[in-house]
Image (spheres, grey):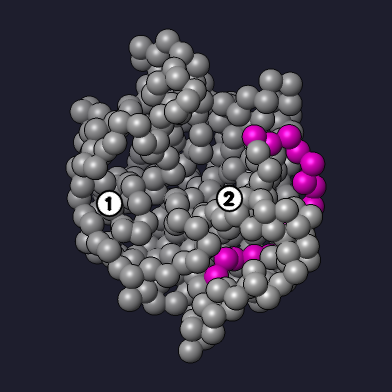
């Protein structure tokens, strides 16, 4: 019944509200406890973070923003403490590509540990043409000597079932299943690819098509998926145009964050999803005068960690800020609704 009422509310939302005063933060759920901005020393304007618990410590990845050239190609890493304060000198990863004669435009670093190996999954352009910009997924292994990080030559996975030459591929969701690295190419339908290293190709390992209801745009990847209490959990993003108080009543693209779960065993079928966007204080209110590629209001999840009581999600705000939000785990997991 709650889900039905929520859907009715979402369908009537824009008709019932004055666009000039629509405030998404009025939706803030009680499981959203607090949010904190993370400042990366020496790299103002960093954004779209990811995080992993590795070697009993927390490792934060981020994208950089050059205030002069506006380049967002750099991807960095820094150790953080339990309060998400940087405790090491940030390092920009030196990623060398084979046979690349045009500039790199790397996006969205996502770490995943499998056994003793730590992988970096990201997307990059594969063509010098800016229009259309064609992207594919890349995977490197991250090496650590106790002081500095290095990255192996990335492998591009450009061949896979359903590949379309002119369609960009980005934000595939990495996860580990029985020691195998998988990538969810899409969430709904849930298409799970298995990279075949050394071939530049992926196999379609599993596919399922549950009846997912989400009224705020197409579900797209965000964080890696982790096993939490017997099922995989991941955070996604979507985007949709509508007017709000942040856009001063103008129809503008708004990015939303949600979560979903899928079964712990193949074929990794979706089981539950957020019934509405996850929203907390300072998600959308705050500085909105950054120079962006188009008018946007962005909340973009990139990773999470958890314990028995809480989940911490790191996310990018307005393509210029790094944030972390703390969720009450029990209330949050109970808020997810079944997919048919």
Q: State the image coordinates of residue 274 (x, y, percent, origin top left).
A: 49, 70
Give the residue displayed 39% in from the left and 45% down from the top.
172
Predominant SS of the magenta segment:
loop
Residue lying at the far bottom of the rendered structure:
1
**Magenta span of residues:** 276-293
Q: Is residue 286 within the magenta segment? A: yes
Instruction: Judge left or right: residue 293 versus residue 211.
Output: right
Q: Is residue 21 within the magenta segment? A: no
Q: State the image coordinates of residue 61 (x, y, percent, origin top left).
A: 56, 39
Residue at the disc numbered 2? 300
Give the residue displayed 45% in from the left and 56% down from the top.
218
Tell me if label 1 and label 2 are in contact, CB under 8 Å: no
Number of other residues with Cα within 10 Å of mark 2, as a class: few under 14, some 14 to 19, many 20 or more: many
Q: State the image coordinates of residue 334 (x, y, percent, origin top left).
A: 50, 79
Numbered tag placed on residue 256 in the rendering = none
Numbered tag placed on residue 192 in the rendering = 1
Work out whether 68 lies above or below 26. above
Give the CA distance from mark 1 to mark 2: 22 Å
Mark before the other along the chain sequence, 1 or 2: 1
Give the residue displayed 51% in from the left and 34% down from the top.
107
Disc 2 is placed on an element classified as strand
Q: State the image coordinates of residue 68 (x, y, percent, origin top left).
A: 74, 21
Examine the image and state in which quarter residue 92 appears.
top right
- The reply to whether residue 162 is in sight is yes
Q: Quadrant of the C terminus?
A: bottom left
Number of other residues with Cα within 10 Å of mark 1, as a class: few under 14, some 14 to 19, many 20 or more: many
């Amino acid at each position: 019944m709650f889900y039905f009422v929520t859907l009715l509310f979402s369908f009537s939302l824009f008709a019932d509200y004055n666009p000039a005063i629509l405030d998404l933060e009025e939706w803030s759920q009680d499981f959203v406890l607090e949010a904190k901005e993370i400042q990366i020393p020496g790299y103002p304007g960093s954004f779209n973070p990811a995080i992993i618990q590795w070697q009993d410590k927390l490792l934060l990845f981020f994208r950089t923003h050059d205030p002069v050239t506006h380049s967002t190609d750099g991807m960095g890493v820094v150790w953080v403490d339990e309060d998400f304060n940087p405790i090491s000198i940030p390092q920009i990863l030196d990623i060398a590509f084979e046979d690349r004669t045009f500039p790199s435009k790397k996006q969205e670093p996502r770490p995943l540990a499998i056994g003793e190996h730590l992988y970096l999954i990201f997307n990059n352009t594969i063509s010098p043409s800016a229009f259309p910009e064609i992207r594919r997924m890349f995977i490197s292994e991250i090496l650590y000597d106790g002081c500095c990080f290095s990255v192996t030559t990335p492998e591009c996975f450009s061949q896979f079932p359903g590949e379309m030459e002119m369609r960009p591929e980005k934000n595939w969701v990495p996860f580990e299943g029985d020691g195998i690295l998988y990538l969810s190419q899409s969430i709904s339908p849930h298409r799970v690819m298995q990279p075949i290293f050394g071939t530049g190709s992926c196999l379609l390992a599993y596919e399922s098509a549950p009846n997912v209801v989400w009224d705020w745009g197409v579900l797209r990847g965000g964080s890696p998926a982790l096993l939490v209490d017997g099922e995989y959990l991941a955070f996604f993003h979507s985007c949709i145009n509508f007017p709000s108080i942040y856009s001063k009543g103008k129809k503008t693209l708004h990015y939303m964050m949600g979560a979903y779960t899928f079964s712990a065993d193949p074929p990794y079928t979706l089981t539950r999803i957020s019934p509405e966007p996850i929203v907390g204080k300072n998600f959308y209110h705050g500085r909105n005068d950054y120079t962006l590629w188009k008018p946007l209001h962005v909340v973009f999840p990139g990773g999470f960690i958890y314990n028995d009581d809480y989940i911490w999600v790191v996310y990018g705000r307005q393509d210029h800020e790094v944030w972390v939000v703390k969720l009450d785990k029990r209330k949050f997991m109970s808020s997810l609704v079944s997919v048919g």
